[in-house]
Amino acid sequence: MFTKKKIIAFCCACLVFLAVDIWMFSTVKNSFAKTIAGVAVTLAKTIASSAPGADESVPAWLDHLNTAYPGYSFFYCKGLPGEEGFREMGGDSSLAAYWAQHQSDEVFVKGVESASYLEVYTAPETMKIGAITGSLLFVPIPAETQDSAAGFLLMAADSSASRSFFSLVNALAIIAFVLFALAFGIATFSRDPVTGYVVLALFAIMLTFVAYPLFEAVRLTFITNGRFTFDTWKTILGNNQYLLALWGSIKLGLCTATLSTIIGFVFAFAVSRTSMKGKKFISALATMPVISPPFSLTLSIILLFGNNGLITKQILGITKSNIYGLGGLTLVQTVSMFPIAFMTLQGVLEAIDSTLEDASLDLNASRWQTFRSVTLPLALPGVMSAWLLVFTSSLADFANPLLLAGSYRVLSVEAYIEVTGMNRLNNGSALSLLLLVPTLTAFFVQRYLTNKKSYVVVTGKPSMRLSNLASKGMQRFLSVFIGIVIAFIILLYGTIFAGCFVKNWGIDYTFTLANIPEALTRGKDAMLSTLTLAGIATPIAGILAMVAAVLIVRKKFPGKRLLEALIMTPYAIPGTLMGISYILAFNKPPILLVGTGAILVINYVIRELPVGVEGGVAALRQIDPSIEEAAADLGADQPTIFKGIILPLIRPAFISSMSYTFVRSMTAVSAIIFLISARWYHITIQIYNFSENIRFGLASVLSTALIIIVLLVFGLMRLLVRQSEHLEKTVSIR
């Protein structure tokens, strides 16, 4: 692969490209510098022509110049040094001090001499004058006869914009050379250039839209006024308000994760380890909160249990109901997030080989003893993973606390207020990064505990039968418990639907249809924007996820673990941090995206990519690679193998990835609330605004419309991807 001939050809090609690269970008910089210099000289001549003849008018003229030309400073001298009548008329104090200190220098002498000949002179070197770093111009002020100089004007021009442009050009030159070297190196040395190009493209995407924004967010917390400092972190860690918000987030996460995991385990156990009836109905309703808008359940809680709630005020007569705070947040987050634990634990419990449980029961162990000594220990890694997932989701949750926190402080909302209310991006970035501390701590504790003990069960052919581990009494208890939770979920969604037809919830319950046309009219543009952007992001995320999954499972290449880590990173970081980091990274050249629809699409794709990749990886690991090897032996190239063999075989994972991206894009809040614009609005933000303005009827209509759209897509996914009846496990009754 690495022959002497190829290495020489590669080095020669890189040297030729480097020479062309340097020449091309140097030409661009020189042309830009000449243009800027010409503009500065033209401006200087224009300013000189406006100089007043009367001495008493000079101060007002200089004040006008300072106001009209920001980024410049001026100092005016009447006459020429060494001549009779020379005097300094005033101007910028820093420039005056610089003149007094350097007027005998060669550059200044030459500048004054040029001014005496009515020529504008630009100092050849950049100078630091007060707050301005840039070029210094000596501008002649012509006399009335236009044949001599009546004085001269020192003009310092800030060149920070030019330096930024030159830095950008240099960076682009380096990037161009690196990309050429990588691309040509892949073509020269790789046996599979297509795979190499795809890996290079994925690395470029992940570095640009994951690593670079996070680096900008971290950098901002250590840079103040262009210098490295710990001032931001000192402010954050020294403020009790922020530390209380951190503890508030942790406490909320602990409560929510614990309750959600318990309820999720009960549901998963009932569905996978009992002979309870109506399992499909239970599973469908249990997953509803995951695919509904984040504000919908919060809205229902307020409508039912708020100060003017239907249950609290109208039925129970409670006039001072306080649903806001830790209690209300724990309730709504538990209902919203226990489906995460349920879906995780259902797969774990169904994957356990029931032969061990059967052996325990055959040895006269009771169902409780079997559950306690066999099932629960084997499910423990899944339980801890489910708890960690919910805990992470709770910490990153932004939508529910925004409406229901009240005086209770959480860090995600504090970060939002710092950015949007206080315009302190550095504090917002630091607070969002602070959320990673409890998340990473919980992750490493979970890994440490699960790695201390082996949970692997070695069996032969897996059993297609699951043991019923619930007695009749326990099954009745589970039925009652699940029935209560399901009834509460139905009550919450029924409230949203009922809110569409109430004139003013909490005050006037008169039936009306006026909410529907008003809400759809006012929310039409936001709904159309959301559907458009989600529709664009969906196929991109699906294809990108499957391509990444194929590379991770089927290919070996340098940096594979790094690429996998970059792909999975967005799932671990809070949405507020993603939103803030995108503002910092893409609100300036070379990638200016803030305010466009593209940044929302990119955020959707990158944010939901990890779930699609995980689904694709799981599907590919069930497919024998010999099928692809046979196609390659018959002459098929990699694009043909991917399109004709891999993609059809992983079709369920592909469709699931696209459906998940669409659902999450339609219901996103935490990251996109920082990225929306007047042109590209989002329906969930419209729902939030209606809720904040006590227009619950309009919020209910849009929530219902959004739920219907999401359910239609989710239902279509279920129709397109059905589990084979031969793979379904049945519960045996002993």
Image (cartoon, rainbow, N blue to C red):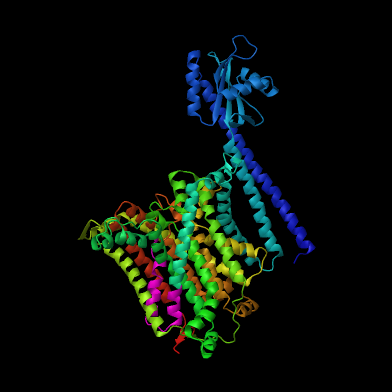
Place residue 140 in its image quadrant. top right
* Left or right, residue 331 beside residue 133: left
* Left or right, residue 291 beside residue 1: left
Q: Nearer the viewer, residue 294 or 262?
A: 262
x 61%, y 76%: residue = 454
Residue 647: x and y in percent read 53, 73
Which region shows up in magenta? 265-294
Indicate the quadrant containing the N terminus: top left, top right, bottom left or bottom right.
bottom right
* Left or right, residue 300 beside residue 470: left
Magenta stretch: dominant secondary structure: helix
Tell me if residue 15 comes above or below residue 120 in the rendering: below
Q: Does residue 274 show up magenta in the picture?
A: yes
Does residue 638 show up? no
Residue 734: x and y in percent read 45, 90
Q: Nearer the viewer, residue 601 or 123?
A: 601
Does residue 223 show up? yes
